[in-house]
Image: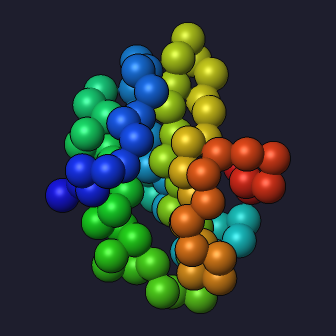
Amino acid sequence: MTDPDETPLPDAEEYHVVVRFRPGGPPVTGTWTSGATALEKYRRWIGSHGSTPGITVTLETEIGGVRTTVKQWTAEHGERPAGPNITP
């Protein structure tokens, strides 16, 4: 369930949630055409694994084959919106 005060995701062709259980580890990736579904999955991964040391959960949009990070969660720092300090 999404937060009613949360800013909606930008329009995109696809949305990706990428989970890594350790820095540089192999990704677990899901892809959806619905931003609402991707945001729900992003939140579920945080809820089920967000306190795991070293985990990174990233929400990305894709337009024309170019992915852009929208949000990222780490156990150490919590959620960070897109910006220069986000690790791809």
Which picture quadrant has residue 15? top left
Number of disc labels: 0
* Residue 5 located left or right of residue 58: left
In percent of width and height, residue 40 lies at: 26, 53
* Residue sitting farthest toward the front: 5
* Residue 4 located left or right of residue 52: left
Q: In the image, is residue 64 above or below residue 45?
A: above
Q: In the image, is residue 10 above or below residue 25?
A: above
Q: In the image, is residue 50 above or below residue 70?
A: below
Query: At 32% across and 78% down in the image, what residue appears?
Result: 48
Query: At 24% across and 42% down in the image, what residue appears?
Result: 37
In percent of width and height, residue 31 lies at: 36, 38
Q: Quadrant of the N terminus?
A: bottom left
Taking depth in this image into account, of 19 and 47 the one nearest to the observer is 47
Query: At 33% across and 76% down in the image, what residue appears?
Result: 47
In percent of width and height, residue 46 lies at: 40, 71
Tell me, yes or no, if residue 69 can be seen here. yes
Taking depth in this image into account, of 78 and 18 the one nearest to the observer is 78
Q: In the image, is residue 87 above or below residue 7?
A: below
* Residue sitting farthest toward the left: 1
Query: At 45% across and 78% down in the image, what residue appears?
Result: 50
* Residue sitting farthest toward the right: 84
* Residue sitting farthest toward the top: 64
Tell me, yes or no, if residue 54 can be seen here. no
In percent of width and height, residue 33 lies at: 29, 27
